[in-house]
Amino acid sequence: MRRLRPPLPADPVTPAVAPDVRSLYREHLDYVWHSLRRLGVPEKDVPDVAHDVFLAVARALPRYDARRPARPWLFGVCFRVASDQLRLFRNSREVLGALAAEAEPPDIAPSPEQSLLDGEARRLVEDCLATLDLPHRAVLIMHDIADHRAHEIAEALDIPLKTVYSRLRAARLRFSSVAAQLAAQRGLR
Amino acid sequence: MKQDETPPLSGFAADLLRAEKRRPPPSAGQRRSLWRRAHGTLVAAGLLTPAVWSAAPTAAAVVLSKVGIIAIWSAVAAGIVTGAVTTAGWIERPAERGTAVTPVAAPAQDRRPLAVALPAPAPVAAGAPPEAERPGERRPGRRPEQALIDQARAALARNDLDTAQRALDEHDRHFARGLFRQEREALGVLVLVRAGQIPQARAAAVSFERRFPDSVFLPLLANALGRAR
């Protein structure tokens, strides 16, 4: 007699229902917003670009594999939309030069931990990120800020895994070096 | 190169990035404002089913859903059960569209005041032309028009959705731009809600909100749709 197999347990990764744009907006707006800032979209332009991102998300939803985590996929959309926007924006060298020239040292140099809590530290992060080109910046943001795994980054940005690691290496070196340089200029260290 | 061969960030750079992770989220106002815009674009592009009362509602919807829900529900319940609504001034708008309407004296026993005072209709700008009627459409007259709305309301109250819808269709055929157009369309949304056709009800509510942004029925619809979720 043929034995029936017990039913397989449900795949815990597979959501019952594919997300819609409303639920993605509700759950991931913060992520999209910060990702755009980190990719170099100016604060005042973030709402406009985020609007375009959710429009692109709605169009791309039929192609989204709901078994995969949403955030890396959303970052990929942010990356592509921001790339288009940033082509019109100033290049990273100009940004760095202008910001470094504008920087005024504070009266009392706070410790790194203290300065991390205020806007100066955030500006410093933005300025350091701005010295990276967009592909390197995207990998650093995804890996070291958003804590995505390398294979997720490769998939989201549509690049080979080896490229993820090589970009991450270069981006970390550059970021560390510029952070030290700018922090010294601004009296943060 | 593998991940474990990737050089780590310097301590200071790592501190900076840890701080970056604690960046505060966008404000509630920014969230609402962005959703309002995105929602409009997505609906216009056909990428989203219209939903005025979604989880990311407009500020107006939030206010409307909080203000006057009880008042409107009480009034509508009173109207459904007793039929007093139509004779107690709820939908008396003789001058609203500049249409000459002969006042109809209601029977004395129907002149009971409503439990809750409802806002007066918005005044119509002086000189505003009356809305054009459809060809072959009857001129709005309170009694027959009102009778159809009463019929729909009573049918809805006893959950006879077919009869309610027939009465509303009849009203639409004969009094498309009638005095009780708002009532007809609001009742139409309620019929859809009662029939479980929630997406259609939401779409109809969106359309209603666009055409009657100041309607006193909006909280009623918001509440009905909210309960249906």
Image: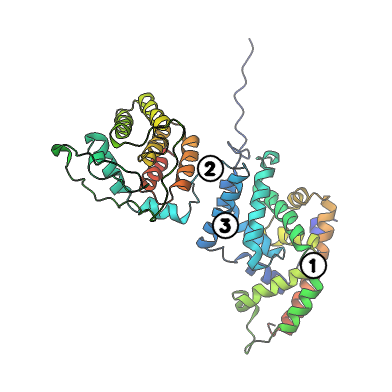
Quick one: B204 or A148, which is closer to the camera? B204
How far apart, in angstroms, are the residues tagged by discs 2 and 3?
16 Å
**Contact? badges 2 and 1 (CB < 8 Å):** no
For the residue marked with disc 2, what is the amino acid? Pro
Q: Secondary structure at mark 3?
A: helix
Quick one: A106 or B33, which is closer to the camera? B33
Report the chain holding disc 1: A
Q: Earlier in the sequence, mark 2 or mark 3?
A: 3
Q: Secondary structure at mark 1?
A: loop
Q: Where does the image place residue B51, in percent across and percent down from the top left?
A: 50, 44
Residue position marked by numbered label 1 in the rendering: A132
Q: Where does the image place residue B117, in percent across and percent down from the top left?
A: 24, 51
**Contact? badges 2 and 3 (CB < 8 Å):** no
**In screen coordinates, is B32 left or right of A56?**
left
Q: Quadrant of residue B188?
A: top left
How far apart, in angstroms, are the residues tagged by discs 1 and 3?
29 Å
For the residue marked with disc 3, what is the amino acid? Leu
Query: Can you see residue B6?
Result: no
Residue position marked by numbered label 2 in the rendering: B50
Report the chain holding disc 3: B
